[in-house]
Image: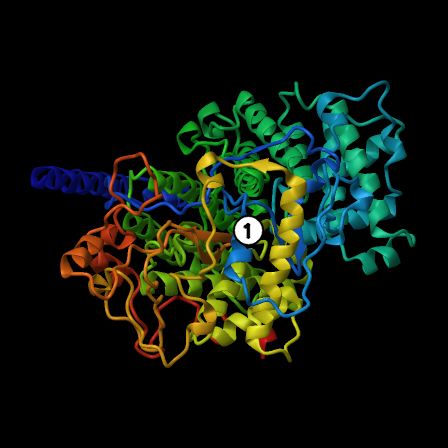
Amino acid sequence: MRLAEIKEKQGTLERELERDVAKSTTSKNTLQQRILADDISGDYDEERDLEATPLVALDVTYEDDVDGAGDMIDLGIQIGKMRITERIGGLSRPRISEEISAGIAGSQPPGSQPPQPVVQTPGIDDLPDFLKPGDQYMVPAGGFFFGQIGEPPSILQFLPYRAAADRLMKQYFASVHPIAPCSHRPSLEATYASFWEEINAGFEPRPSMQAIIFGAMFSGAISMDENNMYQELAGYPKGNWVASLKMGTETALSKANFLRTTKVETMQAFIIYMLPLCRGEVSRAHSVLVGAAVRMAECMGLHRDGEAYGLTPLETHVRRLIWHQLCFLDIRTCEAQGPRPVIRRDDYDTKLPINCNDDDLTHAITSPESADVWTTNTLALIRFEINEMMRIIWIDRRRLETRRTTLTAVLTKIENFRRKMSEKYDHLLDVTEPIQRYTKCVMYLLTYRLHVMTLHPYHSNAANPMPPRLNQLLITSGILIVELAIQLETNPNFQEWAWYLGAYFQYQVALLLATEVYFRPQSREADRIWSCLDYVFSMDRRLPPEAKAIQLLSEIQGKTAVYMRMRKMRGPMSVSRAVPGKNAVNGTSPAVQTQTQPQQPPLGAQDVPKVEPGYTPPLPAGPPVPQPQMVFAGVSDGQALWGLPPNQTSPGSDSSSNDQVGRGVTTPGLRTGTGVAQSSIMDTLDWDTINSLFPHDPLTGGLSIQGFHDPVFGIASWAA
């Protein structure tokens, strides 16, 4: 075993040396275009046991008669600004309503009644309001995908008058292109001029040109404020403009033979069309189309870098934008509808775009030098970098489930990546400039989401409590990303780009924060949590926190009960056999968690570093019950978590029993039949590494999280 460790360390040193040598001999552009996620090593990867959270399923199936309301049921329930389905954060929770119901049993206010279940699957008009799609939901039509039946309509039916078209293109370049670019602006402006020249001359532009212009106008219409659109575009409401331009884009894509095309311009038009569709509300129809687009793009060679084909710098730049936007759509539809990303990192070598302005590429014969300043492509680069790290986290979460890596290794990757991102991009961002401050908010929001993606399955796990330091990291990251999201949505300087927030974040982590403050009302960050929850769920600030928490969780339980009955899903038998219990976290209910009780550390706490002052660790459970029952362990990133009660001993038990528990004896009912003893999550943690990655802040007593205690950047002004 010792020899294997030495060989592993030797291999790690050799890989680091190879990277250092490669960096010293590569050009500036190559270094800038290197995806940071590729440079994050897995120095702590090793096969170790990790406990799994019961009632979590990677995949579920559905009964045959579930299609009454179409893909509307895909969208889940709407509560405040948050929409939740059975699949959140990539994992399915087919019994979430039962879990929450057991967790808050006996705490509901008297007289409260959950929404009544629907007896039969209704149409869209009969759906309850909380199940109906929101303003962001737009389902792509199947006609352009499978081919129109009969003669397609003329594009002139959907073409706006010239002044309106000019206004929509201006809106596209102001509100869409800066944050979600899929084109070279001077080239698209030239294409738009040629489009109108052909229209005015009585010719029909080529279908791919029609598709890209209509896609840009469609995106511009979606990003435009409804009041401004009504006043500036002939008094027609926004919905009419969006519906007409959407149909025009789909008609043009159908004429361009989307399924059989080899034209990059047609694929570019499709990506421009899909970007505003895949934001806060995504159905399986979106996911299927993106999967088809990935295969089409690979058939066109977009997964290979343009330099390998000897293409011009401009052509190479556009191909890179298209491919990496498609990579983003792959991750976005995957986290909304599953089951896993289609694109694999090993399957493509398309580089990141060069950090340069669009004008530098217009007449370039050779690739321009990467700039060490803010450019029109910096925001896109940051998003593409983080997107690839999210792809790695998707893979590592499954490696954690199969015990092929450790939590320490994954957290080390994330923190190393976050620090490299900060070193690479922070100095480029001047927060006094609106677009650059917006970029910094997006970068921090997405990087701290990586912590939540990794840690949420272990939050308040009743069988193996999360160590206090990791719990605080999870909660701190959750607070910061909600505050940043609110800032992106409410800051007047970000008004032009606020429409795209749903593509970054859907407020689902608010449920994790609600659960945390419900079970730990004396938490150091309770005030900041409640400021976030009051905004997300539009809660009455005059009510006491306890009442608001019960009201919120009761509402979620009732609405998810209706949704799950209509969804008619089936999880694995291991999930179906689990029996929810009435206890909350580790066998204690919120009502008995008072300051008069002695605070005892969770199992194995003797190996945990000293807890910061004021932190209330999870309390141990009471005596074991004869039959193992599932224990509600809170909601994490929108997912209610269950665990088996810890195998606690009675007061009269001898010390050998306690030693046995401390060594991680298999909990009955957890991965039964595997014959593998389940160790605690703390047994897999390298605390020296964790402490160095996430040190305490000596001024605040909490964790030292970049931006969290910054009164100018981290804390949104709305909370005042």
**435 or 512: which is nearer to us?**
512
Please report the residue visible at 62 percent of the width from the left and 67 percent of the height from the top: 551
Numbered circles on residues, count: 1
Residue 433 at x, y = what percent?
Answer: 57, 66
Please report the residue visible at 55 percent of the width from the left and 24 percent of the height from the top: 295
Q: What colour scheme was applied to this rendering of the protein?
A: rainbow
Q: In this figure, which residue is indicated by the disc labeled 1?
A: 98
Task: Specify the quadrant of the image occupied by residue 15.
Answer: top left
Residue placed furthest toward the left: 3
Judged from the image, the secondary structure of the residue bearing numbered disc 1 is helix
Amino acid marked by disc 1: Glu
Q: Is residue 319 left or right of residue 698?
A: right
**Quadrant for the C terminus in the image:** bottom right
Residue 65 at x, y = what percent?
Answer: 69, 30
Q: Is residue 704 above or below residue 629?
A: below
Q: Is residue 56 above or below residue 349?
A: below
Residue 421 at x, y = what percent?
Answer: 40, 54
Task: Specify the quadrant of the image occupied by residue 247.
Answer: top right
Q: Residues within 10 Å of mark 1 (few under 14, many from 20)?
A: some
* Residue 7 seen in render: yes
Q: Is residue 518 left or right of residue 113?
A: left
**304 or 555: which is nearer to us?**
555
**469 or 226: which is nearer to us?**
469
**Quadrant for the N terminus in the image:** top left
* Residue 434 seen in render: no
Residue 571 at x, y = what percent?
Answer: 52, 37
